[in-house]
Amino acid sequence: MATTTLPSPPQKVNRIGLEVVAYKGNKTTLCAGCGHNAITERIIEAFYEMGVEPYRVAKLSGIGCSSKSPAYFLRSAHGFNAVHGRMPSVATGALLANRNLLPIGVSGDGDTASIGIGQFVHLMRRNLPIIYIIEDNGCYGLTKGQFSATADLGSVLKTGVVNDLPPIDTCALAIELGATYVARSFSGDKRQLLALIEGAIAHNGTAMLDVISPCVTFNDHEGSTKSYSYVRDHDEPLEEVSFVPFFEDISIEYDPGTTKDITLHDGSHLLLKKLDSGYDPTNKGEALRALTESHDKGEVVTGLFYVDTGRQNFIELLNLVDEPLATLPESRVRPPKSALDEVMAGLQ
Amino acid sequence: MATTHVAVSEIEAAQGQQRIVNDLSIQVATVNGSGSQSSNLVLLRAIFQMGIPVSGKNLFPSNIAGLPTWFTIRASKHGYIARRKENDFLVAMNPETAEEDVRTLEPGAAVVYDERLNLNQIRHDLTFYPVPFDKIVTPVCPDAKLRKLVRNMIYVGVLARLLGVDMAEVEKALRKQFKKKVKAADLNFKAVLAGYDYAEKNLEKADRYWLEPMDLTAGKILIDGNSAAALGCMFAGVTVVTWYPITPSSSLCETLIAYMKRYRIDPETKKATFAIVQAEDELAAIGMVIGAGWAGARAMTSTAGPGISLMSEFVGLGYYAEVPGVIFDIQRVGPSTGLPTRTAQGDILSTALLSHGDTKHILLFPSSVEECYTLAIEAFDLAEEFQTPVFVMSDLDLGMNTWMSNAFPYPDKPIVRGKVLTSEDLDRLGGFQRYRDVDGDGVPYRTLPGTKHPAAGYLARGSGHDERAIYSERPEVYVNNMDRLRRKFETARNRVPRPVIERDDGSDVGIIAYGTSHWAIVETLDQLKREHGLEAGYCRIRGYPFNDQVADFIRRHQRVYVVEQNRDAQLAGLLRLDLSDDLVKKLRSVLHYDGLPIDARSVTDSILAQEAER
């Protein structure tokens, strides 16, 4: 699959013996400097470091700049670039068909918070086991920069148009509705974003990441609240996030008084070092309060807002057989003739 | 049985009229929510058990309780089960509609009515049977709260006495209806007996209608089309069902849930071999079908016209990204909310071409409950064979009404999963191109997500793509793909269920019909022959794209009447797109679109009028 022709030094491989190139995709067609490309790089890195088999992954997206990005990572995995705002239902169907898939959905703020808000809220409510990333730039890039529903009150378009409606906070919605791993990050914060994506891979349930990802072409100017400079200046991390995968020992020393250790579904750990006094990401009410306060202060609070490692996911609730439904043999999906005879006798 | 027959012969002697046996329509007019459905089904089943061909049609309002509702039961020794326009026996229980119901009866008809309504003053050419329902029900049902429901059982007993229905059959039917609710069955049967007793003592038989045992229903079943389709889905091996409630389709998935819980739980693990999800709307329901179909499930949804409209965008994606899925459209009257509890065949044209751009879809047209079952199975095979959404175009009349049928056959061929490559196949082939026409039939090969092979993955998309599924806007790549999709559709032309040439005796006149119109045509053919010596040919279409046999049938006739239950001659429109000009000229239309199931007399009259104009 690799096209390199020059002799290269021995490549580093991950725990399943794959080189990082196995996690890459086609060359991006997005603008140079687009925040989405940085997120793509973190996705590649996270799946590589976790040693996920690419064939297990299903990449899903809707429509928009963000939704093009599944073509740019995990080339050998299956993907489905569906219709605008309706990736959640396609992802749900795919998981119903094959519960062993590891789905990652990539959406944008228009795709999620405007046209797709209906399917988004129901996905969160179901706690479908999926990584759901919103590449959030507050505008519609592919149709040349109109405001989306996550644009902040008072944010200004290049054309001078001022947004006079409050934003939809997708994190607050996700927490309220039942998602079990909810975070906000910034495409420019490599370390935090990587740890949060790795945590999402390890989590069992809906992992919703709203990643502020500036649009260099239409929304990176003075007056925009989704520009690189605005987010850098107003980024207020809740905690310092470190991720320790299940196949590694926790080698760093940490003070249990200031660092919270969250054990995820697959045995991995998220270490959250508190930066202010006592934020508890397992407390829903506290998470919602932190979000409300950040809006009031005009801050971009980032980090893991909420995590619940105990709730059953949607697939578990359905009591499905362990094997994928998609490939069950005829003997298990077509009842015998005696069943039909019994039904017919009852109708005579 | 014996008691009834002694009684009948006594009454018979007392009247001199010519008897009409096993050929009548009973209409029961009640108020929605008054429990009349149970009474009507008991009566229907009792007649069925007597061996008399019977059908029941419920004309109900879009309402839970309070509005008028009518149920018609047609018993026909000829086996006719279409709706008949005329009713011979009216049970008038609804004060609101009683007067109009009586006025529309043909002379000679009979009326069983609530005594308080004083209907016998309205006309003098009918037979009236007043019944004091309130007086009869009080001693039968001391619990005043239940009286409203039990009251309607009384007319079952009255009709049993007046028409000669065997009380043993009534009791058997009633116990079947109430299943394990023995106390309710006992109470209701008391009401039936009280009605019978009242009629025996107080009513003198003065009409001509009688029911007598026959042997035409042995081995037959009674079922509604939605339940039949649900059975088809289960035996087709459906694994993912996603749906959103809408009349008249909801009962399909609800019945399916019940069947699946009974027959599709893994005996060892007690886990489900299926997933059923009530989605948040039809957009999500079809999205889940597309996602599940892409990932390899046999996936389906069921809806009605408004849902089909909402699904339009996703169905285009399914067509273009080539994803299997089965969609049941239990058609009702539109446009918009329309008449949501009335029947139509009004979604044919819009569904055949559903979505934007050049799209065409496979449609199946079941005419009977048996075909709801067999074509449901066929639909899943076709969807996977052709990797495309397939629609089963049922309607409210078929889906929600009770029909007599032969018992359904067990599938005689294995499930068809289509061109799916496994990791072993990929090892052998070295790789694959998702949208390449390897076999020349327009149908490409696919892999399923989760296939453990580095060459298995591809990105499905609704945007332009080449044979390797890579994004492309190149003109020749687009044309190549669209032409292949057309080739695939042409392959389907002679793979969808063939039309049934029900009759073709060299007549100048041919009839084309589909779906529930069939049952009116069966009767129309006899009417045309008996009353006018016209022996028309009849071709019943079962699938779109149209099999070549349809054009052949039209070629063999001079004038072909396309009968359908919509205003705009929708199937004829699809035929016009397909046929050569000389064949198009032969087409005429017979259209019925008042929300009631089509009846033979309307079709016969229309054909004769058009023949006379010629």
Image (cartoon, coloured by chain):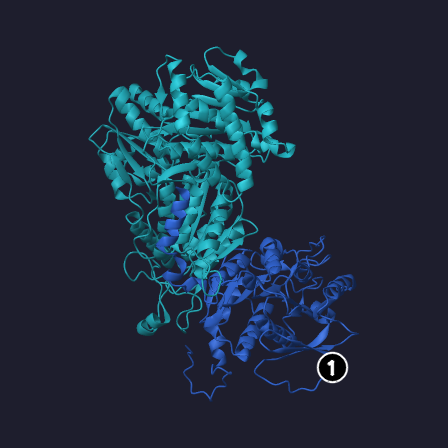
Chain colours: A blue, B cyan
Q: How many circles with numbers are drawn on the protein?
A: 1
Horizontal and vertical percent for residue B315?
45, 50
- Outermost residue on the top side: it is B124
> Image quadrant of residue B165?
top left
In the displayed structure, does residue B574 sit left or right of residue A119? Answer: left
Residue that mark 1 sits on: A256
Image quarter of residue B146: top right
Q: Quarter holding the C terminus of chain A?
A: top left
Classify the position of the N terminus of chain A by image quarter. Answer: bottom left
Q: What is the x, y in percent for residue B581? A: 28, 35
Q: Can residue B328 be seen in this view?
A: yes
Looking at the picture, tell me which residue is in the foreground, B46 or A213: B46
**Left or right side of B598 for A28:** right
Figure quadrant of residue B465: bottom left
Which type of secondary structure does the marked residue at label 1 adopt?
loop
Q: Identify which residue is drawn at 51% across, 30% down.
A: B192
Against B218, residue B199 (above or below) is above
Chain identifier of the residue bearing label 1 in the image = A
Give the class, few, some or many, for how many residues have Cα within 10 Å of label 1's Cα (few <14, many ≥20): few
Q: Which of A179 and A5 is in front in this view?
A: A179
Q: In this view, does A285 lie above or below B277?
A: below
- Is residue B367 something that shows in the picture? no
Q: Position of residue A143 (x, y in %)?
A: 56, 56
Q: Where in the figure is residue A213, as x and y percent of width and height? A: 63, 67
Identify residue type, mark 1. Pro
